Image: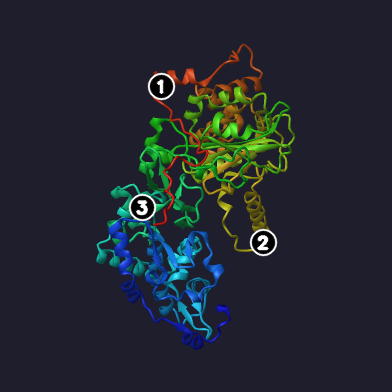
Amino acid sequence: MVSTFKDIRIFKKQLDFKYNSEELSRHIFSPLRLMKNKKQLSKKFKFIDVFPTDDIKTFNSLFLKVKELQYNEENREITIILNHYLNALKIYNFCEEYIEKNIDRPINMLKHSILETCFTIDKKDIYKLSFFKIYRYLISDQLTSLFSQNNIQECELYHKKSDTFITGILNHLKFNVSKNNILPCSITGLFHRKNDVLQIYNDRLTFNEILYNNHIFFNDYKIISNSYAHKFFVKGYGEKRIYFIDYDEDENNEFNFIYVKELKYCVASYDEITLSKYPQINIDSMHNRLRYHDFRIHKELPKQMLPHEKKNEKDNLYLGLEIEVGYTNKCPHQKIHKLIEEEFLQGLAICKSDGSIDNGFEINLVPMTFDYIKNTDLYFKFFDKVKDYLRSYKMPNTGIHIHVSKKPLTILDQGKILEFINSIRNRQYIIKLSQRDPNNFCQVNDTLKVKDILKKDRNPKHYDRENQNHRNIQNTLNDKYQAVNILNNETIEIRIFKGNIVPQTISRFIEFTHCLVQFVKNNGSDKMFFRYFMEYAKKEKIHYPFLNEFHNQFNIEKDVKELKENFRYSSKFKKSLRNVAYDIPQLNIFTGKPKVKKNRKIINR
């Protein structure tokens, strides 16, 4: 085994580079010219003509009996597929450069993989770089690990040299491979059949961004010569993705391409300008299975806002709901999750598992602006479709959690929200409004004050009594089951609400959350009392009809008109916009493979 080499000097003696890349390429110019002139993707050749540096006797019959290889043992003919053949030549050059330049270094996983898959061993334990062995593993799709993100980053120089090497050969032969229906991938430099790659949106902004962000996969010569990505690097197109292209640990973001159906191109995932014009749904249908609990909806589905709100998209206040529900006896278990994701709330929500709920699940909705929620009457329409299938309020452990985007909130604003919801003075008001008593999933701490928000990440210098209190507050703030969970980097999570699917109740919870944000922004820390909050909400009653209706009941006020049972936001909301016409974009979930052109079957000639 290669991994047993301990003495590098012995290892050097066991390597044979008799044929370098330049010499090999000169031996195979004839078959390449023949395929170029006939514009063929595949062609039969004598083994010795296409693999002049390999001895067929080195390989056993099992190694040769691979369906994709199409090797005829009688006349020793093999069918060459052009894209794999060129890729084998590129990798041959890569292996040669990498092993020779790193021969004095310990054998790592990459070097071990190269020696195992790209070299043959003779009876004298001499390792010889094998062009045919590389081709054989490529055609069986067993060398993709060489082009994973980590290996490309580690071997940037060698990949660039091998790309330049193969480009030089094609230029020398004046070989335009696109005429043979193959195209190069800009990420790996490998060649693929034309229906396996997608053209990258040819916009200078996109390319400049790639260069600006210093993505090593895109060098100047690649961008000038081609702009294609293999479908495995494109979300919303292929059956699977083998690798993402890059990962930003600070932002916790993957970098990939996204297929835009309207453009018929793939667009860089950080190209927000183009993607905002063509919003895409890039999650696969689960076919009624629940998604894992760690599925991050705000990373996979676009935020929702009205057209006029896009000017300040990044600074909008977004509200994202998690609604824990259970099944009724009438519920069609075999299709309810699929109906919610792909029909009732298409492109707006996902269903995922939740271990805290018996015989139920959790509905996660994308972050939305308050005006979007009101204008669409989203929860009223949803209730009409699921009222016979789902339940929540009468189940023991269900709740509704509302996530509020942190970006529009200052630290002081967050501290005021923390104190308002935890204050003993507001306890009975919060319980009646939310329909939920404090419990293990929604813990309150009436000692928390506005200033305590600053102690979350600060380390006390001494272990005295005062700093012990500091540590107790830190422990509280770092518990995700608090009534106000501030652990998330992007949102505050308010967990006080009882589970419910009735739209009037959900609307009250949403109005309370939105009104509380506006209240803390417009009032000082000394006003964090529910009576002041109720006065503020009353002044804004046109925006908060369901919240004010609750306040009237809470105060047991007489001669106050109750909202009509069929009251909806939309009619009032359109009046406030003076009947300005606009369309809300309809987004469809990606339910399987798109209709794409398939590669034709290779004909033996």
Q: Residue 159 carries which label?
A: none
Could you give the CA–CA distance between mark 3 and mark 1, rounded to whole angstroms?
45 Å
**Classed neighbour count for the residue bearing mark 1: other residues with Cα under 10 Å, few (<14), some (14–19), many (≥20):** few
Look at discs 3 and 1 and give the one toward the viewer. Answer: 3
Say whether disc 2 or disc 1 marks the residue closer to the N-terminus: 2
**Classed neighbour count for the residue bearing mark 2: other residues with Cα under 10 Å, few (<14), some (14–19), many (≥20):** few
Check if mark 2's residue and mark 3's residue have beta carbons within 8 Å.
Answer: no
Say whether disc 3 or disc 1 marks the residue closer to the N-terminus: 3
Residue at the (36%, 68%) spot, across then down:
162
Which of 440 and 351 lies nearest the eye of the viewer?
351
Say whether disc 2 or disc 3 marks the residue closer to the N-terminus: 3
In what quadrant of the picture does the N terminus appear? bottom right
Q: Which mark is residue 577?
A: 1
Query: Which amino acid does the dot numbered 2 rest on?
Result: Asp
Check if mark 2's residue and mark 1's residue have beta carbons within 8 Å.
Answer: no
Residue at which label 2 appears: 464
- State the image coordinates of residue 415 (x, y, percent, origin top left): 56, 44
Residue at which label 3 appears: 228
